[in-house]
Image: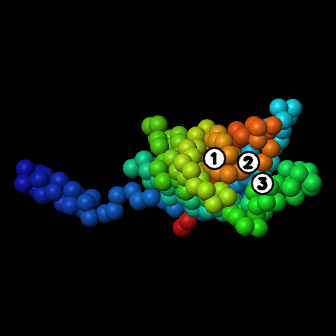
Amino acid sequence: MTRNTSLNTLLASVLLASAMPAFAASNYTIDPSHTHPSFEADHMGLSTWRGLFTKTSGTVALDRAAKTGSIDIVIDANSIDFGMAKMTQHAKSSDMFNVEKFPTIVYKGSAIKFDGDKPVAIDGEMTMLGVTRPLTLTINKFKCIQHPMLKREVCGADASAEFKRTDFGLNFGVPMFSPEVKLAIQVEAIKVD
């Protein structure tokens, strides 16, 4: 092979590669049957109350090559469940989540941070009770697989965060009840073809 042929081959390869799109972000749809945000909150220092939301939807865009991404999660506030009917009904009232006036809780993650090849945190904002505040989620676990039944890529994560509910106007019982809340989100999302 002559030097000119080698250079031409190299140039053609570079031009072909530049004409092809780089790895684009993959889009995923939140699987509502495997996504349940839960939380822990103080009960007068005596015990820790735990609740979860049973209806969640949203999307994830993830570009693992460029180490970027975003996430949009919508939580149906009326799906709150403490496992105790009386407490669940009170939580839905205007004293707390006021689900009639504020039917959704929204998290918009605008920047996914990576450590090497793995996402480790999401910087974003949460809107609850009509108030929007910054909230960073720590990604404690992340994995993608070719799902054996769906025959598509599915990614899953376990994420957590802590915040003060009073920052969002949820002031019921303060100071007798501490305002600190621990949030945990188990999430699975299915790649969009």
Query: In the image, what residue type sits under mark 3?
Result: Met
Q: Name the residue carrying label 1.
A: 167
Q: Circle 3 is placed at which residue position? A: 96
Reading the image, the residue beneath label 2 is 171
Q: Is the residue marked by circle 1 packed among few (<14), some (14-19), or many (20+) residues within 10 Å?
A: some
Residue 72, given in percent of the width and then of the height, sits at 57, 59
The amino acid type found where label 1 is placed reads: Asp
Q: Nearer the viewer, residue 21 or 48?
A: 48
Lower position in the chain sequence, tag 3 or tag 2: 3
Judging from the image, what secondary structure is the residue with disc 2 in? loop
Quarter holding residue 191: bottom right
Label 3, label 2: how many angstroms apart (C-alpha)?
8 Å
Mark 2 residue type: Asn
Q: Residue at x 53, y 42 (%)?
A: 121
The count of marks equals 3
At which x and y percent is residue 104? 68, 63
Of marks 3 and 2, the one in the foreground: 2
Taking the spot 34% from the left edge, 62% from the top edge, the residue there is 21
Classify 10 Å Cα crowding around label 3: few (below 14), some (14-19), many (20 and above): some
Q: Give the alpha-carbon distance from disc 1 to disc 2, as whole Å.
A: 9 Å
Could you tell me which secondary element the residue under label 3 belongs to? loop
Q: Are marks 3 and 1 in contact (CB under 8 Å)?
A: no
Q: Are marks 3 and 2 in contact (CB under 8 Å)?
A: no
- Tell me: 113 left or right of 190: left
Q: Is residue 43 visible?
A: yes
Which label belongs to residue 84? none
Q: What residue lies at 87% left-to-right and 58% top-to-bottom?
A: 89
Q: Is residue 125 above or below residue 118?
A: below
